[in-house]
Image: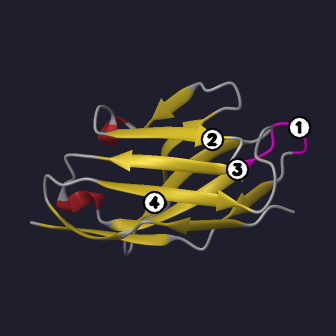
């Protein structure tokens, strides 16, 4: 079992930046880590992911603006956001996926609100 706790959300003006953090209760070394987001009335979509070897993948809507990174020593994953837009407003969730056991773990989410 891995427990994930997101932090760093808040209210920011359009064009601003914010760094989200996801702290895990145990080792994340073997997991693919990802950030998802869900806006009101919409489905939860993947924003960015990073494999255990550091390969990254981004949704087209955030490419060039968001950067995902991981610190395995701290069991923490980050999402650095920049050039934020009102349409980035959502609850952001951290996900840990094991490519071996196929287990999935989710955090409780952190709200990011971008004002125009």
Q: Compared to 29, does 41 lie above or below?
A: below
Question: Residue lying furthest front in this view?
Answer: 73
CA gap, disc 1 and disc 2: 20 Å
Residue 101 horizontal/vertical position (percent)? 90, 44
CA gap, disc 2 and disc 4: 21 Å
4 vs 3, front mark = 3
Tag 4 near tag 1, CB within 8 Å: no
Q: Earlier in the sequence, mark 1 or mark 2?
A: 2
The quarter of the displayed image where residue 91 is located: bottom left
CA gap, disc 4 and disc 1: 24 Å
1 vs 2, front mark = 2
Q: Which residues are magenta?
A: 97-101
Residue tagged 1: 100
Q: Earlier in the sequence, mark 4 or mark 1?
A: 4
Residue tagged 3: 75
Is 6 included in the stretch rendered in magenta? no
Left or right? Give the position of 111 relative to 22.
left
Q: Callout 4: few (<14), some (14-19), or many (20+) C-alpha neighbours within 10 Å? A: many
Residue situated in front as seen by the camera: 86 or 11: 11
Q: Callout 2: few (<14), some (14-19), or many (20+) C-alpha neighbours within 10 Å? A: few
Left or right? Give the position of 55 relative to 63.
right
CA gap, disc 4 and disc 3: 21 Å
Is 100 included in the stretch rendered in magenta? yes
Dominant secondary structure of the residues highlighted in magenta in the image: loop
Please, what secondary structure does the residue beneath circle 3 have? loop
The quarter of the displayed image where residue 55 is located: top right
Residue 37 horizontal/vertical position (percent)? 45, 60
2 vs 4, front mark = 2
1 vs 3, front mark = 3
């Amino acid at each position: 079992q891995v427990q994930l706790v997101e932090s760093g959300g808040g209210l920011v003006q359009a064009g601003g930046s914010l760094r989200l953090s996801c702290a895990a209760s145990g080792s994340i070394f073997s997991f693919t880590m990802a950030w998802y987001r869900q806006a009101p009335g919409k489905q939860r979509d993947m924003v960015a992911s990073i494999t255990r070897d550091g390969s990254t993948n981004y949704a087209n809507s955030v490419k060039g603006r968001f950067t995902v990174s991981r610190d395995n020593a701290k069991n923490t994953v980050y999402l650095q956001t920049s050039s934020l837009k009102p349409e980035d407003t959502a609850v952001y969730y951290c996900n840990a996926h094991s490519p071996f056991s196929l287990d999935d773990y989710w955090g409780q989410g952190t709200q990011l609100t971008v004002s125009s």
